[in-house]
Amino acid sequence: MSLIELREVSYSYTSRYQRVDAMIGIDCAFERGKVYAIVGKSGSGKSTLLSLLAGLDLPQSGEVLFEGVPTSRMDLNKYRRECAALIYQNFRLFPLLTVMENIMYPMELMGLGGNAARDKARELAARVSLPETALNRFPGMLSGGEQQRVAIARALTMDRRLILADEPTGNLDTDNGDRIVDLLVALAHEERCCVIIATHDMAILPRMDAVYRMSDGRITPVSGGPEPA
């Protein structure tokens, strides 16, 4: 059964000079326990797709359904806090908060603080192989690979089931990029998350359960997964 599904989803951007159809009547579904790659040229609609899946925006037509419920009928702030997390290429950590505080932040928004949040943050840091010594450092004191691990640990708070990653290896060297992909694949296969990665990194594609290409507002399967309707 699909965790999240797009039905006839369209989205466009309009300026005084042009209209860009980023998504045109897209039908596609994504399941728990699988890791997906979305590939395509810059401007092909990958980031728009992730934005709609993450509940940062709503489709202009059609529906995005999470566990059968349209996101248009949800409290999107609650959806992002509890169900879906978006991991960015540039990490988007709070520079003046420690690693511990960065991981705890979503939990505090949900009213979980104190020792319970600290214990959970330590557990999540261990899950992404962050050393205990990193927890009291600031993000700028960490390597790029370590910062991306902090971002992933923060995304796992509140047991979110949908993990979206926008070019997660883009700012990393090959070794650190491979480790981040290992971690994202493990989240899907071992912890039953649904992981969707927008990427230009063709080297990761053999690791994916399914690969889709976005072009001219359409999405088509490259390998794995059912054909979009």
Image: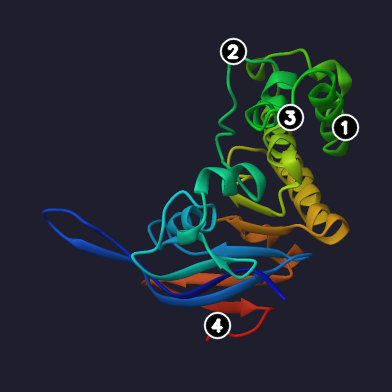
**Residue 229, horizontal then vertical, whole percent:** 52, 86
- Is the residue under label 4 in contact with that under label 1 (CB below 8 Å)? no
Location of mark 1 (residue): 123
Q: Earlier in the sequence, mark 2 or mark 1?
A: 2
Which residue is pictured at 66% across the width and 33% down the height?
Answer: 110
Q: Nearer the viewer, residue 62 or 142?
A: 62
Secondary structure category for the residue under label 4: loop
Separation of marks 4 and 3 at Cα, in angstroms: 36 Å
> What residue type is disc 1 on?
Glu
Q: Quadrant of the N terminus?
A: bottom right
> What residue type is disc 4 on?
Pro
Location of mark 2 (residue): 96
Q: Earlier in the sequence, mark 1 or mark 3?
A: 1
> What residue type is disc 2 on?
Leu
Is residue 167 among what the camera can see? Answer: no
**Residue 10, horizontal then vertical, whole percent:** 37, 70
Location of mark 3 (residue): 146
Q: How is the image coloured?
A: rainbow
In this rendering, position of residue 210 left or right of residue 60: right
Location of mark 4 (residue): 228
Separation of marks 1 and 3 at Cα, in angstroms: 16 Å
On screen, residue 203 above or below 100: below
Separation of marks 2 and 1 at Cα, in angstroms: 22 Å
- Is the residue under label 2 in contact with that under label 3 (CB below 8 Å)? no
Q: Earlier in the sequence, mark 3 or mark 2?
A: 2
Separation of marks 1 and 4 at Cα, in angstroms: 38 Å
Q: Which of the two marks, 1 or 4, is nearer to us in this view?
A: 1
Secondary structure category for the residue under label 3: helix
